[in-house]
Amino acid sequence: MQTLAILLLVLGLQVTGSPSPQTHDQHGHREMDPETPIYVPTPGHQKMLDLLRDIRDRAPVEHFWLGEVQARALRAQAAELRPDQDDFTRFDLYLKLGEAEQRLGREQEAIDYLTKAYELLPAVERDLEDAGRRLSDPELYRDPERVKDMRRRYDAAEQRLVELNAALESLEEPTG
C-alpha cells in the first residue's frame, strides 16, 4: 500500500511538475508572484460572465421595469394623442408616463406629466360622476356587457386617481 502511495505521488509530480519554491515575507506569509494570475476563468465561467455582461448592457433598452421600454412606448403614445381624445385616456396616459419617468429618475419629466394628469382631474371627476349616475340607471342593466364595461372603467378611473395622489405626494418640490 505504501508503495502505491509513493508511486502516485511520483506520477503526480511528473504530470503536474514539482512545486515551485515559494518565498515568504517577514511574517511567514507566502508571497505571490505578481505575474501569476490569481484566478484564470474556465471557458464555462467566461461564457457565464459574457452572458451576464450582455444582460446588463441590454437591460436599459429592453427590460420593461429596469429600462426605458415602458417610458419609450408611453412617450410614443403621448405623441400620437389626438386633439379629440377623451380626458380619461389622456389622464391615464399622463399618469402612467409620469410614474415611468419617475422610476427612471427623470424628476422634471415626471413632474411635468403628473401635472398634466392633475390638471385633467376636474374633467375626469365629472366623467366619474356621470359614470356613477349612468351606473344607477335601471335601463342600463338590460345590457350586462355594457354594465361590466362601465363598471371596469369606473373602477379603473378611481384606482388611477388614488395612484395619482400617491405619485404626487412622493415627489418632492424641486429646490431652487
Image (spheres, rainbow, N blue to C red):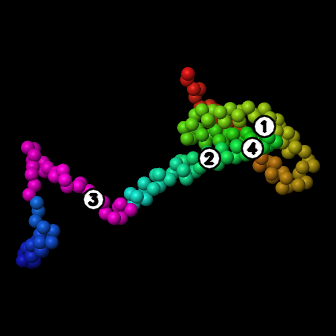
In reply to whether residue 132 is colored magenta, the answer given is no
103 or 160, nearer to the observer? 103
Magenta-drawn segment: 21-47
Q: How packed is label 4: few (under 14 Cα within 10 Å), some, or many (20 or more)?
A: few
Q: Alpha carbon of mark 1 to alpha carbon of mark 2: how far?
A: 25 Å
Q: Alpha carbon of mark 4 to alpha carbon of mark 3: how far?
A: 56 Å
**Residue 124, label in figure:** 1
Q: In this view, does 125 lie to the left or right of 72?
A: right
Q: What residue type is labelled 2?
A: Arg
Q: Residue furthest right?
A: 139
Q: What residue type is labelled 4?
A: Leu
48 or 128, nearer to the observer? 48
Please report contact status of discs 4 and 3: CB closer than 8 Å, yes or no. Answer: no
Q: How packed is label 1: few (under 14 Cα within 10 Å), some, or many (20 or more)?
A: many
**Residue 40, label in figure:** 3
Q: Is residue 77 visible?
A: yes
**Residue 76, label in figure:** none
Q: Name the residue under label 4.
A: 81
Q: Earlier in the sequence, mark 1 or mark 2?
A: 2
- Name the image quarter holding residue 143: bottom right
Q: Which amino acid does label 1 sit on?
A: Val
**Residue 72, label in figure:** 2
Name the residue: 73% across, 39% down. Answer: 91
Query: Residue 93: x, y in percent?
Result: 70, 43
| Location of residue 11 with respect to 37 vertically, above or below | below
